[in-house]
Image (cartoon, rainbow, N blue to C red):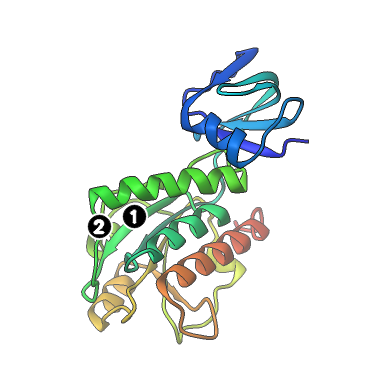
Amino acid sequence: MASHTLYIPDADEHAGEIIISGEEARHAVRVKRVREGEGVTIVDGAGLLLLGVVSAAKRELVIRVSGSERVPRAAPCIEVCSAAPKGPRVSDLIDGLSQVGASVWRPLRCERSVTSAGEKKLDRLHRVAIESAKQSGRAWLLEFAEETTLESALREPADLFVMAHGGERAMEVVDCCPAGKIVLFVGPEGGFTDREIALAREGGALLASFGAHTMRIEAAAVAATAITMHLARIGEGSCD
């Protein structure tokens, strides 16, 4: 059984043997203690999953490929548009969204936003997404989209818009149909303004509550994503 997952963006599904060097090999051998004879999984972040056995584990990692699989994208596709938490908490947000299966994270610039995700920060968050994919075994990397506003996001195509807003009724199975592309809005610490809430309603967004208590951005976004995905999946096939 594979005990370690490696990220190789240019992995070839037809390769009989893969040689890995650099930081990925060093981390696997020195930190994860991967040894000869162990089973490993290789993902390319774009749906390819390879199974193999380590035949050499020194400066380079040599893996004999035993099987391959093309994994479809997660359904539903959930794009999380959220305000960016301050400091290291944004890494917790990305790690959590990756683990629960969000497809895309897009920074949302709100009227009460206090920080933004710059280019350097996004580069670091991409590395967080890679490590989270390796830890959780997801074949598709969490994608990042450019920062947007509520007005702009509501004009883009989606099967369902959802705004996480305390005080509303809880999300239900029937709310998630159809479960194609779902855009989930999560506001800043101060919450959405009355104007933003009105914009969401006018744009056809469903306002829903995802917990009994007020949560920080990173907790609210992860909880809302997990709940929405679960409800959409158990409701799959029950919609006209």
28 vs 61: above or below: below
**Residue 118 placement, left or right of 101:** left
Residue corresponding to mark 1 = 106
Measuring 52% from the left and 76% from the top, which residue is drawn there?
210
Measuring 65% from the left and 21% from the top, which residue is drawn there?
63
| Image quadrant occupied by the N terminus | top right
Q: Quadrant of residue 199?
A: bottom left
- Residue sitting nearer the eye, 11 or 172: 11
218 vs 50: above or below: below
> Label 1 vs label 2: CA separation?
7 Å
Name which residue type carries label 2.
Thr
- Residue sitting nearer the eye, 8 or 172: 8
CB under 8 Å between discs 1 and 2: yes
Measuring 44% from the left and 56% from the top, which residue is drawn there?
94
Measuring 62% from the left and 37% from the top, which residue is drawn there?
5
Residue corresponding to mark 2 = 148
Residue 214, visible in the rendered structure? yes
Q: Secondary structure at mark 1?
A: strand
Q: Earlier in the sequence, mark 1 or mark 2?
A: 1
144 vs 230: above or below: above
